[in-house]
Amino acid sequence: MKRENRGPYLAMGLTAFAVIAASLLLFFLLFHMKEVTGFLGTLGVILRPIFMGAVIAFLLLPVHRGILRFLMAMTTDKRKADHRNVAFLNFVAIILSLLLAVFLIYLLMAMVFPQVYESIVGLVQSIPDYIEVVQGWLQTFFEDNPDIQSAVMSVYNSSTASLEQWLNSDILPNLESVSTTFQWVRTTIWPNFTGVMAGVSGVVMGFLVLVKDLLIAVIVSVYLLARKDVFAAQSKKIVYSLFRTDIADLLVDEVRNAYKIMSGFINGKLVDSLIIGVICFICCSLFKFPYPALVATIVGVTNIIPFFGPFIGAVPCGLLIFLVNPLQAVYFAIFILVLQQFDGNILGPKILGETTGLASFWVLFSILLFGGLFGFAGMVLGVPVFAMIYSVVSRTVAHGLRARNLPVETEEYMGKTGPMAR
């Protein structure tokens, strides 16, 4: 067989091999899903500092670019001609962006943490008063409902009888003499205490591991910011080597659009949540709501979640205020509704603009879908991720319609339409 005639057979062989390999891989995944999931979990733990560093670099990239543009504008063209000077300015911009981020975090903690601490201490100190208030409500409620009172009191009496029996049979006999007390502590109390100490040591070790991952993540973010242009160029080389030029251009353009959507949404949402937290703190202080700093912190943090965020944060805050003053809880609910309308209709669109371009239904759909799959992170990132998917699908559909000389506008397909063939 001639060499030039082997091409079709080689392509058929490679296609058959790819199909068989894909079938075997699918079979392995279906019947060894537990092992695969465990391996992916272990891999995620190992690469967690890399992921955290990528997130830090992603958040710092707009600040880094702004500082770098300022430094480049202050540098003469003769110095910018030397790539070593440009690399030095890039490194200085990275350090300044990290220092600015640390300063902002410190400033936020210095302003918020003392107020939050005082609110938490006040809340803990007021717990006995809250218990008395609840007991008063229950007594009043039971006086008006004697049937419920008799049912609850029967359960209460049986519980107290069981408690007295446990104390008389298990606790008090073990405290009658030193020897029995020592034996009881050694056989019963000490094993439970060691378990508690093991849990505490596990928490401490987890905290130390988190600190270690954060330090590595900062170093990774420096490397990513320093070599972002090189990584982007290498990625483009791979894309253009695998696809046709027009398809590669489309992929590169979609990645740029995805970055624009993601960065615009996340950075805008952080600024929006900070402003909402400050407004909430000021208004809660003016309206004399209890624990204004704690309430504002909860509302500001949960506001990062689109659509549901203000209401998620308002529920625990409303309960705290309700325990102090039920009438103020009603005023607080009205205030949260007004604040949510202000954020959703005025402040949010001004800051975010048309970052996502999603209708309200798709925002709700993306939050429910990604929140159910990935929890809190999915609720925060679900909207920009779905916006990227929506953009890719919309542009693909528009490209297909233009290729068939069909209208792209949705209005052209509303109502009863006739034959589209021309």
Image (tube, helix red, strand yellow):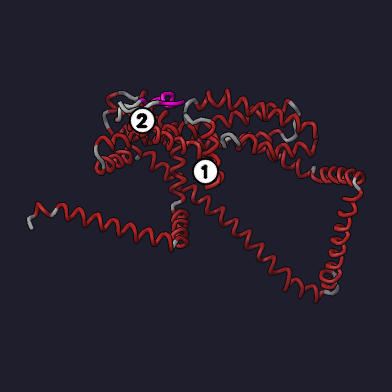
Q: Which residue sits at x=83%, y=43%?
A: 129
Q: Which residues are magenta?
A: 407-417
Q: Which residue sits at x=87%, y=54%?
A: 151
The rendered magenta stretch, by its main secondary structure, is classed as loop
Mark 2, residues whose alpha carbon is within 10 Å: few (<14), some, or many (≥20)?
some
Q: Gap between marks 1 and 2, in whole Å?
A: 26 Å
Quadrant in which the C terminus is drawn: top left
The percent position of residue 280, horizontal first and vertical second, equals 66, 29
The front one of 122 and 157 is 157
Above or below 51: residue 61: above
Mark 1, residues whose alpha carbon is within 10 Å: few (<14), some, or many (≥20)?
many
Identify the element where label 2 is drawn.
helix
Identify the element where label 1 is drawn.
helix
Q: Amino acid at mark 2?
A: Ala
The percent position of residue 142, horizontal first and vertical second, equals 89, 47
Residue 413 magenta:
yes
Residue 121 placement, left or right of 240: right
Q: Is residue 103 visible?
A: no
The front one of 410 and 17 is 410
| Residue that lies at the very extreme toward the left in this rendered image | 2
* Mark linked to residue 398: 2
